[in-house]
Amino acid sequence: MAEINMVPFIDVMLVLLIIFMVTAPLISPSVIQLPSVGSAAKSPDRVVQVLIAKDERLQLKEGATTTDATLRDLAVRVAELQQATGLAAHEVPVVIAADKAIRYETVVKVMDTLQRAGVQRVGLSVQTVP
């Protein structure tokens, strides 16, 4: 019978280990630049808020004034509130505050409506978990 010479399994594993040890330092990890809270700009004095309730009802809030709105007249109502502040329309930010049960699609529709109306500064309001 012919004798078959087999390479021991441990030798193969050692060769693979050496290959991985040599190539691992050559692979650079990707670095993601995340924004930090400390570098945020000063929060604006006047803000128009778009509140989205659980039943997808929209309300506009500026200061102590809160009014109901629909998606159709949202752009007109936001423009009116921005003009009431006495500043240019692009200087007054709009913040969207939605209930956590709201579908993402609804928030995107509101953002799209504001963008089409020429609102340049749109933000999302979030609640931090203690």
Image: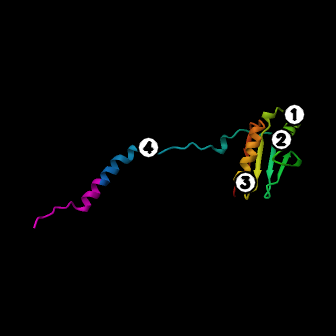
- Which of pointers 3 and 2 indicates the residue nearer the eye? 2
Q: Earlier in the sequence, mark 2 or mark 4?
A: 4
Kind of residue at badge 4: Ser
Marks 1 and 3 in Cβ contact (< 8 Å): no
- Which of pointers 1 and 2 indicates the residue nearer the eye? 2
- Which of pointers 2 and 4 indicates the residue nearer the eye? 2
Q: Residue furthest front?
A: 72
Label 4 SS = loop
The residue carrying pointer 1 sits among few (fewer than 14), some (14 to 19) or many (20 or more) residues within 10 Å by Cα, namely few
Q: Residue at x 57, y 42 (%)?
A: 33
The residue carrying pointer 4 sits among few (fewer than 14), some (14 to 19) or many (20 or more) residues within 10 Å by Cα, namely few
Label 2 SS = helix
Q: Residue at x 22, y 62 (%)?
A: 8
Q: Earlier in the sequence, mark 1 or mark 3?
A: 1
Instruction: From the image, tell me which residue sits under label 2.
Output: 78
Residue 100, percent from left and from top: 73, 57
Q: Indicate which disc residue 127 carries.
A: 3
Kind of residue at badge 1: Gly
Q: Point out the image quarter for the C terminus.
A: bottom right
Q: Indicate which disc residue 86 carries.
A: 1
Marks 2 and 4 in Cβ contact (< 8 Å): no
Q: Indicate which disc residue 28 carries.
A: 4
Kind of residue at badge 2: Val
Please tell me which residue lies in front, 130 or 97: 97
Disc 4 to disc 3, C-alpha distance: 35 Å
Disc 1 to disc 2, C-alpha distance: 13 Å
Label 3 SS = loop
Disc 4 to disc 1, C-alpha distance: 52 Å
Disc 3 to disc 2, C-alpha distance: 23 Å
The residue carrying pointer 3 sits among few (fewer than 14), some (14 to 19) or many (20 or more) residues within 10 Å by Cα, namely few
